[in-house]
Amino acid sequence: MSTFKTIMWKVLNLPEPRDKPKPEPQTEDERASEKVASVAPTGVQRWTAAGQRLQGETAAATATAVATKPKQTREAAAPWRIEDEKSGAKALAKFGRVVLWGVVALAAVTGVRSWFWPDQPQAPTTVKVKEGPTYPVEEAQAIAGRFSRSYLTWDESDRDARAKALARDMPKGYDTTAGWNGKGTQNVVATLPGTVTDLGDKRARVHVDVLVSVPGKPATGKNKTAAPAEQKWMGLEVPVLYTSGRIVVTGQPGIVGVPTSGPSVTDQTTVESDVVLADQTKGTVETFFTEYSKGDADTVTAPGATVPPLPTGMNLGDIQSWTVDKGTGSDRTGTAVVVWDVSGAELTQTYRVELTRVASAAAERWQVAEVHGGAS
């Protein structure tokens, strides 16, 4: 048995196979008998061969009887022989079995494939957390706008009305009468909440534009006609605090000025015009604006288009200009400068008009699909 097979039998704790017993050597008589039997008798030798065969059979029977008796008392030969192992060999066999079954268990858990083709490590996925606004801007604007209306509205004939209105948006226990001496009359027409400046620590400042109306002076003496009410814009900056889930006004606001003009801007880029298409579609645009002023624009718009009607009292005065932007395709955009007659005055307006080409079996034509006020 080879050395490798010997080690495996010991690791698996299997008994070693015994060598098969070699056949007993033949006796002289048996060899003689086989030799005589191998020679076929012929002629006068028949009787001599028969005698020799009889002697051989007798000798063989005698030898068989003698050999059979000790074999009956001999222990039955087993195919395996159990031999005691030394303590070191037993320990080695047990350790080998533990290692072998450990490898089998590891293969079952991890999979044999991962031993030869391990998975490539993947980069961790970055989870983007959507951050909310740093401050509740809309709520701050709403509270500051309502507070501004209450703050800039007063009537000396009803002082408590202002104090009650301010109490809605100020912390409990604050003095709602502070800042006004209780004289005069003023009303707020409109409020426009604007920029919210985050000051940190849940505090902010809200700018509100307020349109106020101041009653004119009453008629006195020679002046029997009362002066008309005066309206003016003023700015109000309101300090607010976000606490307990809501916005409150934490202190006295301050009246500030309102800008008299906007900032400077760069000149708008001039778009090249398509003169030919503008001439072809001028009649379409004139018809559209005529019906547009009558509230019946749907009759001259492209199929599926919906254009809400203008307010009543607007009459088309003139179309000062009509240009179409350079381009290609069945959808084009143009600019119309229109003069309207409104309440005895003339107003010049600018519109961006979307045209689409509509085709039928007989012909094709351009129609208005959309209209928007103002040039971009």
Image: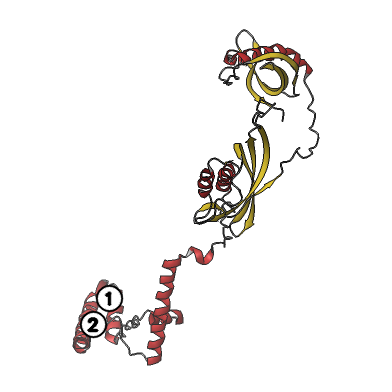
Q: Amino acid at mark 2?
A: Gly
> Residue at 57% of width from left, 60% of height from top?
124
Q: CA distance from mark 1 to mark 2?
A: 9 Å
Is residue 8 at all visible to an observer of this figure?
no
Give percent across and percent down for residue 42.
Answer: 27, 71
- In this rendering, the answer to whether 329 lies above or below 24 is above
Q: Amino acid at mark 1?
A: Ala
Label total for image = 2
Of residues 199 and 180, the one drawn nearer to the viewer in this rendering: 180
Give percent across and percent down for residue 198.
Answer: 63, 54
Q: Residues within 10 Å of mark 1 (few under 14, many from 20)?
A: some
- In this rendering, the answer to whether 113 lies above or below 155 is below
Decide if residue 239 is on the left or right side of residue 320: left
Tell which circle, 1 or 2, labels the residue nearer the N-terminal end: 1
Q: Residues within 10 Å of mark 2 (few under 14, many from 20)?
A: many
Asked if marks 1 and 2 touch (Cβ < 8 Å), the reply is yes
**Residue sitting at the far front:** 221
> Residue at 23% of width from left, 74% of height from top?
46
Decide if residue 356 is on the left or right side of residue 92: right
Q: Which residue is mark 2?
A: 56
Give percent across and percent down for residue 172.
Answer: 50, 55
Of residues 221 and 8, the one drawn nearer to the viewer in this rendering: 221
Give percent across and percent down for residue 372.
Answer: 65, 25
Q: Which residue is mark 1?
A: 37
Q: Secondary structure at mark 2?
A: helix
Please state, as top left, top right, bottom left or bottom right, where the C terminus lies in the image. Answer: top right
Give residue 175's quadrant in the image.
bottom right
Of residues 86 and 99, the one drawn nearer to the viewer in this rendering: 99
Please state, as top left, top right, bottom left or bottom right, where the N terminus lies in the image. Answer: bottom left
